[in-house]
Amino acid sequence: MAKDNKMNQVILGLLNHENLTGYEIKKRIDSSLHYFWKGSFGSIYPALVSLEKQGMITKVDNEDNSKRERNVYGITDAGRNYLISWLVDSKTSNSLKYEMLLKLFFGGAVDNAVSVDTITKFENEITEELSVLKVYKENLIKVLNEREHVFYYLTVSFGVETYEAYLRWCIEVKQILLKEDN
Amino acid sequence: MAKDNKMNQVILGLLNHENLTGYEIKKRIDSSLHYFWKGSFGSIYPALVSLEKQGMITKVDNEDNSKRERNVYGITDAGRNYLISWLVDSKTSNSLKYEMLLKLFFGGAVDNAVSVDTITKFENEITEELSVLKVYKENLIKVLNEREHVFYYLTVSFGVETYEAYLRWCIEVKQILLKEDN
DNA sequence: TGTATTATATATCAAATTGATACATTGAGT
DNA sequence: ACTCAATGTATCAATTTGATATATAATACA
């Protein structure tokens, strides 16, 4: 087994649902997965080449007969098997990197007003994203009878639940920082 | 400005509080920061070399006169200035990578029981970590009058708030998955 | 009609990071 | 005396980021 290349699983998971180009894969990551996953072109395209070489995916017919280069990929049986073998292993590594919290943790070196600014900016971003997620959630809850929507609902629900926790925390800690006399 | 090397800020932030070896820096990351940040030796030691070359940190006297190699680093004025310039910039990039949610998102390819297992494992890990965090929080809340403890409290509080949200979500989504007939 | 901007699409690169491994010393327990 | 865990530095291939380059197609709008 090669080193743990998570982009492989992302690609296989997405292609298991529909055929896609590298560009479209990037769009799916940025829209459907962005509140719990990230990925850049610099890892997508090399992974596509590698997965094709391994027989996990193949180029499928390009229905668009324009001059523009366009490689549409589809998953193979080998790819599906690999995807499933990853899914059934319940071991997961969850990596968080909140630069916001890092700045807060080291906030002793600056005025509290600086830390409050950092939190406020985070709070505004989360507030905006939360309102979008809530709309998703409300729409998905109506179609939960179709199995394919359930899995999307679960992750959106995770986003809503955690983002609301973030916002509660923002209010609490801003009060603490503003109460401090520094 | 070089590429965004976050390990630099982690090291400067920690050294701003006390002098440390690379090994001790790793321990601080794994204990105090681990629920919102991660870092490995492979990025710590090269960053130390680079920061020393830039004059941000210096080797300080090694009080331990044993034969073992031991490089204790301290922050310089230049390092402190760089740390502060990073702190006052409220822009933060927060990167989350939950492999657990990735598996859940692609759960349509396997039985719901598989997804439930993945969630249960996550739930158990979080439950254990939460109990530790709660003890930290209770101890810190008693010493909030000392400013240095406030910043640690804020991040611990973030952990408690979000971990509790995770657990509520685990219960909710397991019910949904078990209700489904697949 | 022309033309500017945005979206689609692939590709590459240096720098940063991970996760593993190697190696050596010290301390604690048995 | 011996073993295991902790301390400590260092390096490596594989992976990932974030930026940049290049080009075509579609849309807006003047």
Image: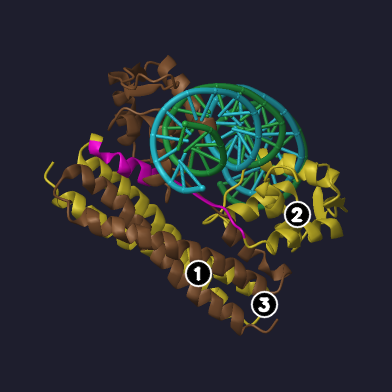
Chain colours: A brown, B yellow, C green, D cyan
Question: Residue at 73% across / 39% down in the picture?
Answer: B46
Which of the two residues, A6 or B139, is positioned nearer the viewer here? A6
- The picture quadrant where one finds residue B32 is bottom right
Which residue type does callout 3 highlight?
Answer: Arg
* Left or right of A14, for residue A34: right
Q: Is residue B84 above or below residue A154?
A: below
Camera-nearest residue between B177 and B23: B177
Both on one chain, marks 1 and 2? yes
Question: Could you say which disc has been placed on residue B157 in the image?
Answer: 1
Q: Which mark is residue B147?
A: 3
Task: Give the foreground label among 3 and 2.
Answer: 3
Amino acid of disc 1:
Ser
Q: Any mark on residue A9, and which?
A: none
Mark 2 or mark 3, which is nearer the start of the sequence? 2
Residue located at (37% from left, 42% from top): B102
Residue A142: % across, % down: 17, 56
Q: CA distance from mark 3 to mark 2?
A: 22 Å
Q: Are marks 1 and 2 in contact (CB under 8 Å)?
A: no
Q: Of helix, strand and loop, which one carries label 3? A: helix
Residue at x 50%, y 67% (from the top left corner): A123
